[in-house]
Amino acid sequence: MFYRRLFNFPTWGLRSPFDEWAQMRRRMDRLFEGVMAPYQRAQAGVFPLINLTEDRTNYYVRAELPGVKAGELDIQATANGLAISGERKIAAAAEGARYHRREREAGKFSRMIGLPGEIDPDKVEAKLENGILTVVVSKAEAARPRQIAVKS
């Protein structure tokens, strides 16, 4: 290493020619992290978190929506999807309060959930209980499995 820098001497395989590029890339990443830090906000992730399950006749979508009231939700069903949107409101902190950690965000949210098969948009039921939204979506008749009798 010392010889290479001092005398511009090749090291014949002891060091990869791409090491210089990797080092430059790390330096550029550090530079942009420092420049962009004031403009980036901490994201808690996709909201709301959901579970999607199914049985023979229905899909079940369960979403965590703590602090959201039923009247603040808008649920729309399409041929093979479900859209959940609304607004999450959090009480404002006292004036002059200093945050030490702020992970809960307030604001509007929207989540589109693609379902594995066709549904019947007219047969969708939703219930909000203890901060858990449960949406029962009926499968379309064409998408339901059928028992076929075998003749002998």
Image (tube, helix red, strand yellow):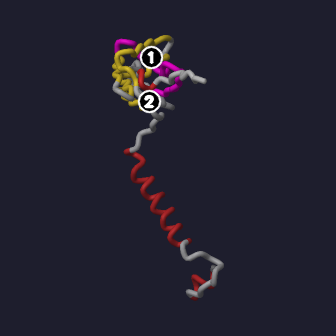
Give the spatial CA distance, label 1 vs label 2. Answer: 31 Å
Q: Position of residue 48 (x, y in %)?
A: 45, 27
From the image, tell me which residue sits under label 2. Answer: 117
Mark in the foreground, 1 or 2? 2
Q: Position of residue 5 (x, y in %)?
A: 57, 82
- Determine which quarter of the picture holds residue 135: top left
From the image, tell me which residue sits under label 1. Answer: 67
Circle 1/circle 2 CB separation < 8 Å? no
Q: Quadrant of the N terminus?
A: bottom right
Residue positioned 39% across, 30% down in the render: 112
Q: Position of residue 19 (x, y in %)?
A: 56, 71
Mark closest to the chain's N terminus, 1 or 2: 1
Closer to us: 29 or 99: 29
The amino acid on which the numbered mark 2 sits, given as a three-letter code, is Gly
Residue extending farthest to the front is 152
Residue positioned 49% across, 26% down in the render: 50
Secondary structure of the residue carrying tag 1 is loop
The amino acid on which the numbered mark 1 sits, given as a three-letter code, is Gly
Residue extending farthest to the right is 14
Q: Position of residue 91 (x, y in %)?
A: 40, 18
Q: Quadrant of the C terminus?
A: top right
- Which class describes the residues within 10 Å of circle 2: few (<14), some (14-19), or many (20+)? some
Q: Is residue 65 magenta?
A: yes
